[in-house]
């Protein structure tokens, strides 16, 4: 019975913690992307918030000119056009195949990147490519070891670029490891990969409130430039985030609800234990009454007892859940599990109230016992 | 101080009404030593329970210290039990999980006496029962006579005016039974009213007044003035 109560409490706490952890994980992933972000994908996707269409006709590419045109909107602070490709990067004898991001200096703002050494790509006309690059932390380590790479020239594909900066360490963000990339000016990347299309355009709105307006103006500007066709998809970060948040909250609550039902079961068990206790201690109850205990004193006594029982169970449950979560954190350190205060307090609250509510009936029965019957044996 | 006036108590057994007490009228003066006798089913235990406010009569009035207790609610009755009446049972009714000290302490806890005062009074009571060296023993570590002495200590801890003893020696051997009787009679000499239910004619002869119960009625009362 104590075990049932502690299992109930422990599962409530564990499930809410995992739920909170999942929520934190998603939130962290998204915020490492930057804030107030809109992502423009070429092609029209009918489902909002879904993945970009992998197949299907792409009526018109997003071009660098489209991206530059977006900067005119007052609701948009930064525009970072992105071209992505993969190319071998070599320095001396060493060569690695890495992801090449072609962009503008704005990408550092939009994705909240910073450099460990050197500087970002210089501002300037984005349509003119310069032969300079910023490399990721991991790539620097693998190509250069501990030597400072600033000013060195690396070969990317069939071109040569001068290294002007190294990115500071930053974790994964949405599956892209920013430590293993090379960032070069967008025009250089377009030349390198021989394309005029952009992979996507990342836009940072001028503020939290102007995200919607930014979205509208993006649609308007692109429509004008694309012969009145809505052939882009815009994903807002907040929309994604809130969708995830809703899903995870629902999930957490429903699992916690299941766990709460197990607490109710524990409460019923407590009631049975207390009923047995009352019938076993009939003569004690009779004695208490004969030495002058009032009905309410007897009632209180048994209520306190069941409350103590459930409290002990809850305490055990808290200990068990903390151990489980600690082990879990040891095993999966990347997953940020936090024990939410509301989860713990809800679990303990439900446990205690179940103990007391289900203790009322046996306690009432005890207090209503007729002392004469209770004292006589059988 | 105890006045029973036309007290009746009716139990329904099956379809029959059994008169456990049938218009019983008794007056008991303070400090009396009263033995209630009678075969089983004669109503003597019911009479004791009514006097001890554990049972409510169906008819009649019961005055304790000039208070009509039949009109009081449960809580008031519990209060009178706590302060005016001490019970001694045949089966001791000690709480098995508690030590002698804690058992004696129970009425004081119910009455809300401070821990410090409780400790002193319990110590005194146990000493008067010659149980000081047994104070930390639980009931299963005590002999029958010792258990009954713990029960008596518990009964007198609130300094009641009346002690109700239901076959106090019924579960004891002769020696410890005599010991317990001597203690109870000693208390009676100090002015406590002692009312005892017993089967044993030898014991009842020691009492100053004897009441014989038959079929719920008082059939003989030696002390009626």
Image (cartoon, rainbow, N blue to C red):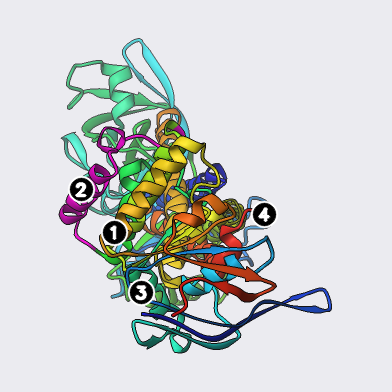
On residue A378, the disc is: 4
Q: Which residue is mark 3?
A: B79
- B148 vs B215, left or right, is left
Can residue A3 be seen here? The reply is yes
What residue sits 39% from the left and 61% below the top? A67
Earlier in the chain: of badge 3 and badge 1, it is: 3
Select label 3 or label 1 by which is in front.
1
Can residue A191 be seen here? The reply is no
Return the residue found at the far right. B15
Q: Which residues are magenta?
A: B113-140
Q: Depth check: A49 or A353 in front?
A: A353
Q: Is residue A311 magenta?
A: no
Image vertical order of residue A284 relative to residue B194, above or below: above
Select label 3 or label 2 by which is in front.
2
Q: Mark 4 and mark 2: span between their CA atoms?
A: 35 Å
Q: Residues within 10 Å of mark 3 (few under 14, many from 20)?
A: some
Picture quarter with the N terminus of chain B = bottom left
Select label 4 or label 1 by which is in front.
1
Q: Depth check: A78 or A301 in front?
A: A301
What residue sits 58% from the left and 61% below the top? A374
Q: Which residue is mark 1?
A: B189
Select label 2 or label 1 by which is in front.
1
Q: Which residue is mark 2?
A: B124
- Mark 3 lies on a secondary structure that is helix
Q: Mark 3 and mark 2: span between their CA atoms?
A: 23 Å
Q: Mark 3 and mark 4: span between their CA atoms?
A: 27 Å
- Mark 1 lies on a secondary structure that is helix
Q: Chain of mark 1?
A: B
Q: Chain of mark 2?
A: B
Earlier in the chain: of badge 3 and badge 2, it is: 3
**How many marks do you count on the picture?**
4
């Amino acid at each position: 019975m104590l075990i049932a109560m502690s299992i109930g409490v422990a599962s409530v706490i564990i499930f809410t913690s995992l739920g909170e952890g999942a929520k934190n994980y998603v939130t962290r992933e998204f915020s490492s992307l930057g804030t107030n972000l809109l992502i423009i994908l070429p092609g029209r996707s009918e489902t909002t918030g879904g993945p970009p269409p992998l197949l299907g006709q792409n009526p018109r590419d997003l071009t660098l000119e489209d991206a530059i045109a977006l900067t005119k909107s007052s609701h948009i602070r930064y525009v970072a056009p992105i071209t992505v490709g993969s190319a071998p990067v070599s320095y001396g004898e060493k060569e690695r195949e890495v992801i090449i991001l072609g962009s503008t200096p704005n990408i550092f703002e939009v994705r909240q990147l910073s450099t460990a050494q050197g500087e970002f790509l210089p501002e300037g006309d984005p349509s003119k490519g310069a032969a300079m690059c910023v490399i990721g932390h991991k790539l620097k380590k693998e190509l250069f070891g501990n030597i400072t790479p600033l000013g060195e020239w690396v070969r990317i594909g069939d071109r040569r670029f001068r290294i002007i900066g190294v990115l500071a360490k930053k974790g994964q963000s949405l599956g892209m490891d920013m430590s293993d990339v090379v960032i070069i000016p967008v025009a250089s990347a377009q030349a390198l990969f021989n394309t005029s299309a952009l992979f996507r355009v990342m836009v940072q709105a001028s503020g939290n409130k102007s995200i919607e307006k930014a979205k509208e103006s993006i649609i308007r500007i692109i429509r004008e430039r694309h012969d009145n066709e809505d052939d882009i998809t815009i994903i807002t970060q907040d929309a994604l985030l809130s969708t995830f948040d809703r899903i995870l909250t629902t999930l957490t609550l429903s699992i916690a609800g299941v766990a709460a039902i197990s607490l109710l079961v524990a409460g019923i068990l407590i009631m049975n234990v207390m009923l047995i206790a009352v019938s076993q201690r009939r003569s004690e109850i009779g004695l208490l009454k004969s030495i002058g205990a009032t009905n309410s004193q007897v009632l209180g006594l048994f209520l306190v007892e069941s409350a103590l029982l459930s409290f002990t169970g809850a305490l055990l449950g808290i200990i068990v859940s903390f151990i489980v979560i600690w082990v879990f954190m040891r095993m999966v350190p990347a997953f940020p599990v936090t024990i939410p205060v509301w989860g713990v307090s809800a679990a303990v609250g439900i446990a205690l109230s179940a103990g007391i509510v289900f203790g009322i009936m046996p306690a009432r029965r005890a207090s209503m016992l007729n002392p004469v019957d209770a004292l006589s044996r059988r | 101080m105890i006045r029973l006036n036309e007290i009746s108590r009716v139990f329904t057994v099956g379809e029959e009404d059994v008169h456990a007490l049938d218009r019983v009228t008794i007056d008991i003066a303070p400090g009396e030593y009263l033995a209630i006798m009678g075969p089983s089913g004669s109503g003597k235990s019911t009479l004791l329970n009514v006097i001890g406010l554990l049972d409510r009569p169906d008819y009649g009035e019961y005055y304790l210290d000039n208070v009509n207790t039949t009109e009081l609610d449960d809580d008031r009755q519990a209060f009178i039990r706590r302060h005016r009446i001490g019970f001694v049972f045949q089966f001791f009714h000690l709480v098995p999980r508690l030590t002698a000290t804690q058992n004696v302490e129970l009425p004081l806890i119910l009455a809300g006496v401070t821990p410090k005062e409780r400790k002193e009074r319990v110590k005194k009571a146990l000493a008067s029962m010659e149980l000081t060296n047994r104070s930390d023993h639980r009931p299963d570590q005590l002999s029958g006579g010792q258990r009954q002495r713990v029960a008596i200590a518990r009964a007198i801890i609130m300094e009641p005016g009346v002690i109700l003893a239901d076959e106090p020696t019924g579960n004891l051997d002769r020696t410890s039974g005599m010991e317990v009787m001597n203690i109870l009679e000693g208390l009676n000499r100090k002015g406590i009213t002692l009312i005892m239910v017993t089967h044993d004619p030898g014991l009842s002869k020691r009492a100053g007044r004897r009441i014989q119960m038959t079929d719920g009625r008082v059939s003989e009362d030696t002390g009626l003035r």
